[in-house]
Image (tube, rainbow, N blue to C red):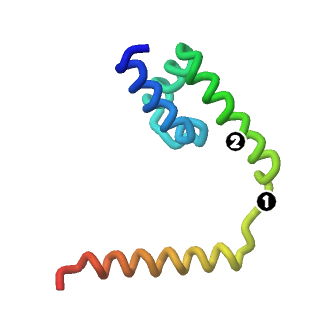
Amino acid sequence: MSDHEDNDCREVLTEVYLYLDLECSEDRRYVIKQHLDECSPCLREFGIEQEVKALVNRCCGQEQAPNELKERLRAKLSELVVDHETAREPG
């Protein structure tokens, strides 16, 4: 395998979760899918990742976080955003 192909594989495998979660552009999805269709080592790796994600989804996919937890997380995230914005202000 050439360095160029090795770099392509590394890049594709770092984006597998974005691909699985439909969180990348259609153009990028096409490039990743084409690479996976043509590259046996990446396809094997992707297959493992896809199976793990499917298993987690089957086991935990229907569970919802309690409303209290969601509210605490929202409050904490709001605090972090305010703290971050305050730290960035010149002063």
Image location of residue 73, percent across then percent down: 59, 74
The image shows residue 23, relative to residue 84, as above or below, that is above
Q: Identify which amino acid the numbered label 1 is placed on.
A: Glu
Image location of residue 47, percent across then percent down: 67, 28
- The residue at which mark 2 appears reads as 53
Image location of residue 88, percent across then percent down: 26, 75
Q: Which residue is drawn at 47% across and 25% down?
A: 9
The image shows residue 53, relative to residue 8, as above or below, that is below
Task: Tell us which disc is closer to us: 1 or 2.
Answer: 2
What is the number of the mark on residue 20?
Answer: none
- The residue at which mark 1 appears reads as 63
The quarter of the image holding the C terminus is bottom left
The image shows residue 8, relative to residue 68, as above or below, that is above
For the residues labelled 1 and 2, the Cα–Cα distance comes to: 15 Å
Q: Identify which amino acid the numbered label 2 is placed on.
A: Lys
Q: Quadrant of residue 48 in the image?
A: top right
